[in-house]
Image: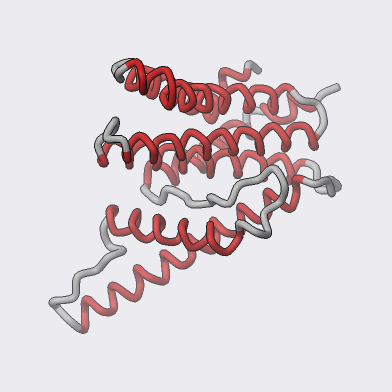
Amino acid sequence: MSVHSLRIHARAEALADRLSVIIELWAPIHRDGLGRTIVESAEDIAAQIKKSYEARITDEKLHRLVLADECIQEAKHGIYRSINRALLDEHEGTMLTRSFRGLSISTIEFANAILERDPEYRGQWRPWVERRRVWKLRAMADVVDNVADDIVNMGVNPEFEPRTCTVNGLMEWFDDAEEDEDDTTAEGATPGSTSDTSSDTTSDTTSDTTSDTASDTASGSLSDAEKT
């Protein structure tokens, strides 16, 4: 099976292509500086996913996915800087950062699928995958609790304005949670990892994340890559 059949790889390439088209329109001083850095980081995401797919041992597979996630964080940081420079409007920048968050979660889930296929692996990257994944699951559980609280408050007080019962409200909540998580885990992060573990909770991202991992794994992408 070709790596180009992996949905997570296709999503990474599509996001890099989208950024290239946008950045091509920037003034040379921005396009050749910050813009080039963003595009290179975005291109490296798909490249690292490809190398992970082609690797034969679990440690190398996971290492490449860690590098892919680092590229995601670098590209996302570049998007934030682009917004600050008014190169991207806030709406477009927000949509791009959320796309990168969704891709990051897909990458983590892909790494977790590799761990599940090699339960004996106790290398340096297992704690990284588990830490990132635990935070995501905890954040999702907190969202469910907050939605439930909002529903109760709406019944008690008709004038109550729920925050989590709208997509924008959910995104704001996760943005706040991302900042809190960055502050609390930066010092204890595994070398080579990053602290940003936010997820995009829109239905598209959730379904993409689940279907990417399930589709890629079920189709034999992992087992094919591991054959010696």
Q: What percent of the width, then of the height, locates residue 180?
A: 48, 63
The residue lying furthest to the bottom in this view is 156
Q: How many marks?
A: 0
Figure quadrant of residue 21: top left
Q: Is residue 171 above or below residue 32?
A: below
Residue at 64% over, 26% down? 48
Task: Give the quadrant of the C terminus.
Answer: top right
Residue placed most toward the observer, 211 or 179: 179
Q: What percent of the width, then of the height, locates residue 78?
A: 44, 35
Task: Give the quadrant of the N terminus.
Answer: top right
Q: Is residue 50 above or below residue 215?
A: above
Q: Is residue 59 above or below residue 116?
A: above
Q: Is residue 189 above or below residue 70?
A: below
Residue at 43% over, 22% down? 33
Residue at 32% over, 22% down? 22
Q: What percent of the width, then of the height, locates residue 116?
A: 73, 46
Residue placed most toward the observer, 57 or 74: 74
Figure quadrant of residue 24: top left
Residue at 62% over, 39% down? 110
The residue lying furthest to the front in this view is 29
Instruction: Classify residue 40 as left or right of residue 174.
Output: right
Q: What percent of the width, then of the height, locates residue 189?
A: 67, 54
Instruction: Classify residue 113 as left or right of residue 35.
Output: right
Instruction: Classify residue 6 as left or right of residue 201.
Output: right
